[in-house]
Structure formats: structure tokens, C-alpha cells
Amino acid sequence: MRKLFVLVPALLLALSGCATQGGAAFSEARAEPGKALVYVYRHDTVSQEWVPTVRIDGTPNFDLENQRYAALNLAPGKHVVRALWPRRSDLAAAETTLTLEPNQTYYVKVGSETHDGEIGKAVVVYMNAKTSVRAVPRDEAMKSLPQTRSAF
């Protein structure tokens, strides 16, 4: 029992250190020859505890916390980028289809928003949630990307 009292705090300390470690600060990546460079990022104005899993063409690739990005080299052609939120979050999945050209760079923003609902006659208050995955121009992406850290 005494070992348990020593082990549990040590484990919690180790895990808390891992949880606070972030990825590297944003830096521009290079596209591999013949591939397209795709930045997938999330920079919501309000941090939420729900973390979506980003899937490229149906394969779970990575979780995307708020203020994080991933730089991916993908083969030219059509790709579906989808964000799936945990079921208990009540946030809908969202996706976009990209047609990638070789040696080009693309920016995909994953977003989530919540808004206060309306108060009806029964005095019911609810929240509206909206999610999105969309390609954005470089100008828009570069307003947020420098404040993000790597998802990996």
C-alpha cells in the first residue's frame, strides 16, 4: 500500500509533464517533390475541451487540439479531409474535398463555434454548435498559423 502512495503521485507528475508539453512552434514546411503540401490547422477563438480526430481519405491521421497544426505531404489528386468530434461533444463531423496539384501548398482550417441559443416561451436556454473544415487562402491561414504549435 505504501508503494501505491508513492507510485500514484509520481505517475501523475509524469503525466502532467507530458500534458503540458506542446509540439514545436509553427515553422513553414517544404513540399516533397511531386507532392502537395497541406497545412491542417485549428485556431478557434474559444478553446473547447473537445478534440477532433482528423481523417484524410478515411484513415485516422491525428487529433487536432486547439492552436495546433499539421503539415502533410500528400499525393496529387482528390482527398477528403474530415474532422470527427467525440460523440459526447454533440459537435457534428465536417469535411471538405480537395483536388491537389503537385508542388502546391494548401491550407485547411478546422473550426468549431458555439453560440447561445434563444430563450423560448418555456424559458429554455440551449447552445448551437457549428463545425467546419474548409480550404482557406494563404493570407487568412497566415493570420493564425504563426500562433499554433505542431500537432505531432
Image (spheres, grey):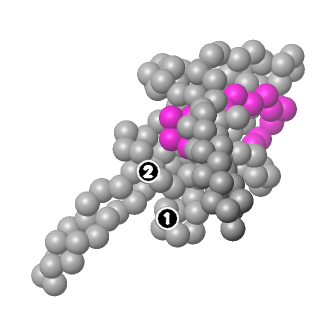
User: Please, is residue 124 above or below residue 86 in the view?
Assistant: below
Q: In this orientation, which residue lies closer to the viewer: 131 or 124? A: 124
The C terminus lies in which quarter of the figure? Answer: top right
Chief secondary structure of the magenta span? strand
- Whether the residues at callouts 2 and 1 have beta carbons within 8 Å, the answer is yes
Judge from the rendering whether residue 1 lies leftward or rightward of residue 92; answer left or right.
right
Residue at coordinates 51% horizontally, 20% vertically from top-left? Answer: 146
Element under disc 1:
helix
The quadrant holding residue 125 is bottom left
Name the residue beneath numbered marker 1: 89
Q: Does residue 75 belong to the magenta stretch?
A: yes
Q: Does residue 73 belong to the magenta stretch?
A: yes
Q: In this orientation, which residue lies closer to the viewer: 70 or 79? A: 70
Residue 48's disc is 2
Residue 147, image x and y in percent? 48, 24
Lower position in the chain sequence, tag 2 or tag 1: 2
Question: Alpha-carbon neighbours of circle 1 within 10 Å: few (<14), some, or many (≥20)?
Answer: few
Residue 51, image x and y in percent? 56, 52
Residue at coordinates 65% horizontally, 15% vertically from top-left? Answer: 28
Outermost residue toward the front? 2
The disc labelled 2 sits on which kind of residue?
Gln
Element under disc 2:
loop
Magenta highlight range:
65-79
Residue at coordinates 25% horizontally, 65% vertically from top-left? Answer: 117
User: Please, is residue 144 above or below residue 121 in the view?
Assistant: above
Residue 17, image x and y in percent? 60, 38
State whether residue 68 appears in this view: yes
The disc labelled 1 sits on which kind of residue?
Ser
